[in-house]
Image (cartoon, rainbow, N blue to C red):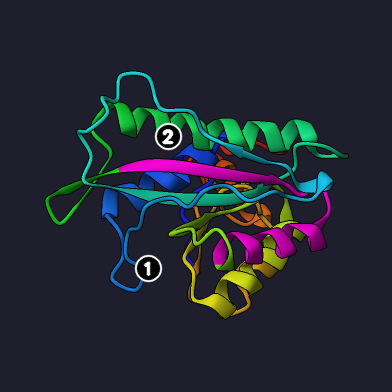
Amino acid sequence: MYYPGHGFRWLPSALAAVMLAACGAPASAPAPTAAPAATTAPAAAKPTTAPTAAGASSGTFDGTLLFGAPISLTGSTAKEGALTRDGYDLWRDTYNKAGGINVGGKHYKIETKYYDDASNAQQSATLADKLINEDKVNFLLGPYGTAPTLQVSTVAEKNKMPMIEGNGAAESIFSQGYKYTFGVLSPAQNYLRGVIDLVLTLDPKPASVA
């Protein structure tokens, strides 16, 4: 697994997908396909399909890349889940307005599909499997929180589906040896590492840090 330095709690959601877009679709990822029609979801897992981004003209794209995520839109982490979704939406709209993702000289429109996991980690894993095997997404975007991310990372690994996650920070996520989960938020124990490094450069050195 991969994770660079830390940032704001909601911003990595946008940065995560931007990193993937900047690199283009990896060779091991499924070939770009047209987004399938949404299927009827259980009451606890209503899908939301992104509207067309403002400024993106129809007919200017060579194809579509579908990104899917189980997101907490109800339940105990609904607020944080909504911010995670907003980060992904910001990335999607920004890139579509600029012409989409460039892969091999072709421009692909980004579409996103979300299911509400109701702040339940097991439901998050179930919905990730649905996104991969029923909705046929090209990539997964991570859910909010450590517990759901742990569950979804296992699903991603089993299906060899690349997932970029921006809102799971426990070291346990990154110590499983998985090859298909990529993170942009550093492990929680590293949050203050930069502060400590800065303090050590001060002269005179402070007697304490409060």
Q: Say above or below: 117 vs 134.
A: above
Q: Per the image, is 20 magenta?
A: no
The answer, for residue 9, to whether it is visible in the render is: no
Task: Pinpoint residue 172: horizontal percent, then vertical percent.
Answer: 70, 69
Query: Tag 1 or tag 2, which sits nearer the N-term?
Result: 1
Q: As drawn, which residue projects farthest toward the top?
A: 55
Q: Nearer the viewer, residue 23 or 57?
A: 57
- Describe residue 160's horizontal placement relative to residue 93 as left or right: right
Q: Nearer the viewer, residue 15 or 78?
A: 78
| Residue picked out by circle 1 | 30
**Circle 2 SS class:** helix
> What range of the chain is rendered magenta?
109-132
- Describe residue 79's horizontal placement relative to residue 154 as left or right: right
Which residue is painted at 68% across and 32% down in the image?
Answer: 82
Which residue is painted at 83% across and 45% down in the image?
Answer: 43
- Describe residue 106's horizontal placement relative to residue 57 as left or right: left
Crowding around mark 2 (Cα neighbors within 10 Å: few <14, some 14 to 19, many 20+) is some
Give the number of the disc on residue 91: 2
Task: Pinpoint residue 193: horizontal percent, then vertical percent.
Answer: 58, 50
Which residue is painted at 48% across and 38% down in the image?
Answer: 14
Which residue is painted at 77% across and 59% down in the image?
Answer: 147
**Circle 1 SS class:** loop
Task: Pinpoint residue 15: horizontal percent, then vertical percent.
Answer: 44, 41
Q: Say above or below: 41 vs 58.
A: below
- Describe residue 137's horizontal placement relative to residue 133 as left or right: left
Amino acid at circle 2 = Trp
Amino acid at circle 1 = Pro
Q: Say above or below: 72 vs 59.
A: below
Total numbered labels: 2
Task: Pinpoint residue 19: horizontal percent, then vertical percent.
Answer: 37, 49
Q: Nearer the viewer, residue 28 or 189?
A: 28
Q: CA distance from mark 2 to mark 1?
A: 21 Å
